[in-house]
Image (cartoon, rainbow, N blue to C red):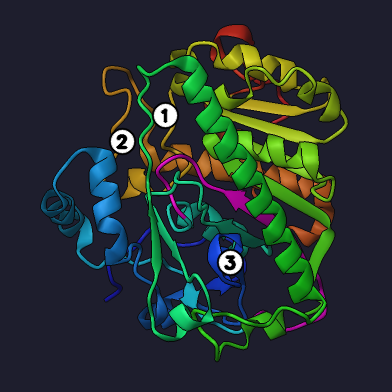
Amino acid sequence: MLPKHLPLPEGPFVPGCFDVMSGYGEESTFLRLWYPASLTDVKKHASQWPRWMDNDYLQGFSAILGIWPIFLRTALRWVGDDLRIPGVWNADVLEGTQQFPTVVLSHGLSACRFLYSSLCMQLASHGIVVAAVEHKDESAASTFFYENESKYLSGKKSTIIFRTVSATSDTGHQLLVRRRQLDIRASECSRALDFLIGVNEGRCCENLLDPETKILEQLKGRLDLETASLMGHSFGGATTLVTAAKDDRFKQLIVLDSWLFGLKNEENMPKVLAKVPKLFLNADYFQLDLKGNLDIMRKLVSPTDSKFTVKKSTHEQFCDSPNIIGLRLNRDKPRIDGNLGLRINTHIVLRYLKERLGDSVKWDNGNFLQENADHIISDISVQETTQLSTKL
């Protein structure tokens, strides 16, 4: 019998994954790397499926949710005390010479590197490498690093916990904090790409979290970084825009239900990003409830950008939480099924990457989007568009 798990991958490849930490101090790179593995049946390797959450993160998520850790642990036990991600930990990379499309992922506020496992796993199962960064700007539920080699050898971690910024505090102060965080996040996304370039060239094979792993060596020459993509959800969506304005190595952006408060005074950004291809994919209710966010977004959307909204969807339907604790947001409104909303979002992302990158993305599920076309509109908001055309 399989353990309790997130929904199984739908693509033709078994997804592999492992955690990577390279370097010391706050300038280090910490990410979870997803990739197509050499295996043929993910179910046969259930003993190697990683746990969804490490115990180190229980305190952070509890504080963010405003509940005692024991209550969160009880809730997790209800869905499965040992919930697993159906990707194979440290599996060998898919054999061959083909290069994999590569995506760097920036998480949202109070999230972390594993909160988007469903999305990352599905992309990896369709032939895409995803580097899910864990940010050290005090926006993650929790994270850690090693200050130096001595601290690493003695096992002494430096922990960074989530910083709450009151919504009732001075707007100028809020903006200053968020802009500082965005600058840190942008640097971390660029460093993640630097690291991947080093892996591809055979220079970066060190992993402090698993010195014996050979996966980084197996990825030498296998990453297509000439077409690197940057993807982010919520605050991570704003991060993608800030990063791309500074770093032109990212050739397309996938902006998932972005929270853009930190960009409200960035008058030059629309011009800087005008020629960068972008997908804006929004949740219906989040954008309608967030005053002023769409005004900022309209300035950033270029005429050639792709834009979609999933009707009756919520902000959480880009991450794993609907399949773990159910839908918590917008309970007073009719909502699309939690897993269906996540699947639609995932397949829109896959279709966009397929259109941009061609046959290296092993996706061929247009029928699913066609069957669910009634849930999708081709604009950034339900209120300002018409029903999606027959393109889907």
Question: Which numbered dot is residue 196?
Answer: none
Q: Amino acid at mark 3?
A: Trp
Quadrant for residue 23, please give it.
bottom right
Q: Secondary structure at mark 1?
A: loop
Tell me the distance, in whole angstroms, between the alpha carbons under discs 2 and 1: 8 Å
Question: Which comes before the other along the chain, label 2 or label 3?
Answer: 3
Give me the residue at 43% from left, 48% from top. 140
Q: Which residues are magenta?
A: 93-112
Viewport quadrant of the C terminus:
top right
How many residues crowd mark 3 within 10 Å: few (<14), some (14–19), many (20+)? many
Image coords of residue 47 (percent x, y)? 36, 82
Residue 211 in the image: above or below residue 20: below
Question: Can the viewer see residue 133?
Answer: yes
- Tell me the element at label 3: strand
Question: Label 1 belongs to which residue?
Answer: 314
Q: Nearer the viewer, residue 340 or 265?
A: 265
User: Residue 215 appears at what percent x and percent y?
Assistant: 63, 82
